[in-house]
């Protein structure tokens, strides 16, 4: 048995994410005892909270039994139960560390955390050696993954028992050398709702991500969600939503809004928990009744209409998964039809509109919202809820309309301010919050500085003159 240690330790290695855990082993005349997996202690020392779902045991009858170098698509924690093994690990992930080798002897006092995509092999150094490993994915028939030759000269692994004398399976004797291995690709980012205005901005902010629309994955379809290959991703960004505020008040719209804005996020939260994904979800100022002039992340939810109620339900559901970013936003402007485009068109056609002057807020341009999303993920900000909009002095819809008219060569005086009640007279309209200003203190504390809405508006109008 390896020399026992007094305290639990987690040590890094030359392979990123491959960690050696030194375990206290308590021995007496009867034998020994150790805590093989202790979540609270080990995660506090830096071991990932990897969520094991299966425990396997490998028994090796004779010294020299050698398992091939396989890089499984899951994480595992390996620990010896009896005997000793020589372990060898090869990074088979695409990237700068491809081909890096680590090897050491492992006894009962040592465990090794092996991240997804790192090839691992174990050679028994004693008869009747057994080691166990916890994994965080259920094994399924037909699963394929990279493997590399045990005797690859480029790896130069110093096997204690020469491979010519070792017990190696026929399959493992014919694995390819490193130069012929197709490295395991890293997990990707999945963007849902990719055809919408926010989805398009996210596609630009996350090059190389998998961007899908409802035609490819309908998040309201439980069977489609169950069949999706979630193991290929580590981040899911949900930009799919029902955005028709007024339509949500109709019988058909009510059902659609609840399905897209509440039930789908709840299902995605369950998926994220099961597969240890980071879930990014977008919400709205409509979860508040607008009686407060500025809304903080901790304000109690108080939606006025069906749309706001469904978004609030989605907020509650998303908060149940540990790794989540909930971004509440307001007055979104991006590609396609929106308030600014409408005002540009009216200005160009010589129309002088009446616009509501008693609803106050800030615009959020989709590229700014995508930039905030990227920032939170890149800096590893604390999970939770963040308010995101452009910065600057709050304005009414009429005030913004005047700004658009001025940028379009028309006088702002051509916009007539009216009250919400005047504008809504004779129309089937859902209730709106009067104050939609979101407090930006929390997102700023992460190092993100939102751009002034009028600066962004000027650029947007210049890029798309209507």
Image (cartoon, grey):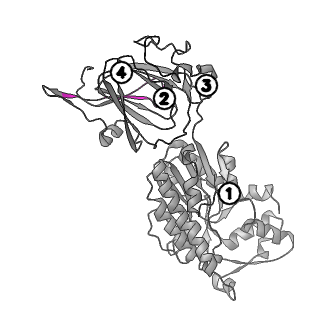
Residue 43 seen in this snapshot: yes
Spatial CA distance of label 1 from label 3 is 33 Å
Q: Are marks 2 and 1 in contact (CB under 8 Å)?
A: no
Spatial CA distance of label 2 from label 4 is 22 Å
Q: Is residue 19 magenta?
A: yes
Q: Which residue is mark 2?
A: 16
Spatial CA distance of label 2 from label 1 is 34 Å
Spatial CA distance of label 4 from label 1 is 49 Å
Going from N to C along the chain, the mark reached first, 1 or 3, is 3
- In this view, the residue in front, 448 or 379, is 379
Q: Residue at x 59, y 75 (%)?
A: 255
Query: Where is residue 299 shown, x and y percent of the image?
Result: 45, 67
Q: Helix, strand or loop at disc 2?
A: loop
Rendered image: mark on residue 85: 4
257 horizontally vs 351: left or right? left
Q: Specify start and end residues of the magenta stretch as a single range.
A: 10-26
Q: Which residue is mark 1?
A: 213
């Amino acid at each position: 048995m390896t020399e026992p240690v007094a305290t639990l330790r987690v040590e890094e290695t030359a392979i990123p994410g491959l960690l050696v855990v030194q375990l206290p082993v308590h021995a007496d005349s009867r034998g020994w005892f150790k805590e093989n997996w202790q979540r609270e202690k080990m995660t506090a020392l830096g071991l990932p909270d990897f969520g094991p779902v299966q425990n396997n045991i490998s028994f090796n009858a004779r010294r020299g039994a050698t398992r091939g170098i396989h890089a499984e698509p899951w994480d595992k924690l390996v620990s010896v139960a009896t005997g000793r093994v020589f372990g060898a690990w090869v990074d088979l992930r695409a990237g700068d560390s491809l081909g890096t080798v680590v090897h050491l002897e492992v006894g009962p006092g040592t465990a090794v955390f092996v991240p997804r995509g790192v090839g691992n092999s174990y050679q028994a150094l004693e008869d009747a050696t057994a080691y166990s490993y916890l994994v965080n994915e259920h094994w399924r028939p037909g699963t394929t993954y990279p493997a590399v030759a045990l005797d690859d000269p480029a790896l130069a692994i110093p096997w204690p028992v020469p491979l010519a004398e070792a017990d190696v399976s026929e399959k493992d004797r014919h694995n390819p050398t490193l130069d012929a291995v197709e490295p395991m690709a890293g997990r990707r980012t999945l963007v849902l709702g990719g055809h919408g205005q926010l989805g398009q901005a996210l596609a630009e902010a996350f090059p190389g991500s998998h961007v899908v629309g409802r035609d490819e994955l309908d998040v309201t379809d439980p069977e489609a969600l169950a069949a999706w290959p979630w193991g290929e991703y580590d981040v899911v960004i949900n930009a799919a939503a029902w955005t028709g505020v007024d339509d949500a008040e109709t019988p058909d719209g009510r059902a659609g809004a609840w399905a897209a804005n509440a039930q789908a996020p709840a299902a995605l939260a369950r998926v994220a928990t099961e597969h240890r994904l980071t879930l990014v979800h977008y919400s709205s100022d409509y979860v508040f009744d607008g009686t407060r002039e500025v809304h903080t992340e901790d304000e109690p939810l108080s939606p006025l209409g069906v749309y706001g109620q469904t978004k609030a339900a989605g907020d509650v559901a998303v908060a149940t998964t540990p790794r989540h970013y909930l971004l509440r936003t307001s007055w979104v402007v991006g590609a396609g039809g929106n308030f600014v485009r409408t005002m540009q068109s009216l200005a160009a056609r010589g129309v002088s509109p009446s616009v509501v002057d008693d609803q106050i807020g800030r615009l959020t341009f989709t590229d700014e919202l995508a930039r905030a999303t990227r920032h939170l993920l890149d800096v590893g900000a604390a999970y939770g809820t963040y308010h995101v909009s452009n910065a600057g002095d709050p304005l009414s819809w009429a005030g913004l309309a005047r700004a658009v008219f001025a940028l379009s060569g028309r006088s702002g005086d051509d916009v007539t301010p009216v009250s919400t009640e005047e504008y809504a007279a004779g129309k089937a309209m859902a209730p709106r919050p009067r104050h939609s200003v979101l407090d930006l203190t929390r997102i700023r504390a992460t190092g993100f500085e939102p751009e002034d809405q009028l600066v962004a508006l000027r650029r947007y109008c210049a890029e798309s003159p209507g």
